[in-house]
Amino acid sequence: MNQQVLLDLIRDLTALSGGSGREQAVISYLAEIMKKYTSRVEVDAMGNLCASFGTGERKVMVCAHSDEVGLFVKHINDQGFIYFDINGMLDERVLLDAKVEIISDDGAVNLGVIGVKSRHLMTPEEFSRPVNITDLWIDVGADSREEVAALGIRIGNVIVFRRHFDLLANGRFVTKAIDDRAGCAVLVALAEKMTSQPLDYTLQLVATVQEEIGSRGVKVAVRRLEPDMALIIDTVPAGEPNTLPQQASARFDGGPVIRTAEFMPQYLLGAVYSAKIVRRLRQTAEAAGIAYQEDVFRTWTDGSGIHAQGADVPCGSLCMPRRCSHAPVEMAAIGDIAATVELASAFLQGLTADNIAELRTFV
């Protein structure tokens, strides 16, 4: 899959709505694509998609999450203004004046704008106060609660940022939900590459749900699929002008990030990745001449939801650098995503059932 095809795929995936717990549009889209490469495509009751290749007894899961950060409709007042709560980890400051889409129960999309009290009307005290989600609302152009209801909007509807896609210089692009539709695109590219590969193990390409609210979907998937090991494909905040390298070391055009550990102490989430898998990922990249980066990062991914669920599942992780994380517009470099496909496919093509058995051992 060349970079233009990969970019077009990401454009299509990021246009879809997939707030945590309401990923149906994304999963349906991926299921149709995966059926081009394998007849073994299934979606569990929670929404996780699995496309399988090979028939060996050993099983390797490669997963990326399909959901995106967003909001929920929480209250509609008499004047037709909509108040909301957060669905995933968001900084309220990125919400000001953002365009959003409210997805009704039947899938209809209503466009709205997040409002905040005008600077002209704020007192100095109000202006100096941190943004609070209770100070914000969504305006869909309605003048009453009844007009909002007539649009099909009700309490509990999922809200996502407005779809868009723009190209920048040097192969970089901006859109919503790069985290982690870029990973979903990698899954599709791997399906294309691996469908013709002789495997003596079973490869499970899994698009998970509800990662942004605690890696809930993957906990169900790993217990059902019982892989012997797993590789997580996700994104990571890249260094920005005001970010110290000891906070975020990843950079654009540096290739995929091979992660050693991740942790989010306040949520008791995290993972220390298998030393053997980390080492094999490095060796694979170096043998193939693929540039890579390394990190330890304060976050969680589906890796933190896998390794301690059911049978022990040693994990590795490849992350793609992004900027403007968890915001109405995120940025990535297509070269890093393509390099992630190359490294992941080289890693998978080099695996055998005996390798997998050895990688599962701790010493």
Image (cartoon, rainbow, N blue to C red):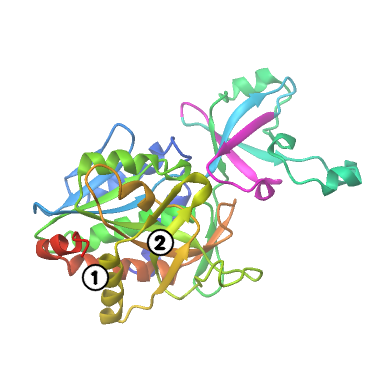
Give the residue drawn at x 53%, y 47%: 266
Q: Say above or below: 201 vs 172.
A: above
Badge 2: few (under 14), some or many (20 or more) residues near its Cα, within 10 Å? many
Where residue 278 appears, as percent x and y from the top left, is: 31, 68
Q: Quadrant of residue 21?
A: top left
Q: Quadrant of residue 274?
A: bottom left
| Residue under numbered circle 2 | 261
Please name whichever residue, 151 or 268, is drawn nearer the observer in this view of the structure: 268
Query: For this view, does 224 lie left or right of residue 234?
Result: left
Q: Say above or below: 36 vs 357.
A: above
Give the residue drawn at x 50%, y 58%: 298
The numbered mark at residue 346 is 1
Q: Say above or below: 317 vs 300.
A: below
Where residue 219 appears, as percent x and y from the top left, is: 32, 41
Give the residue drawn at x 59%, y 46%: 90
**Label 2 amino acid?**
Ala
**Label 1 amino acid?**
Ala
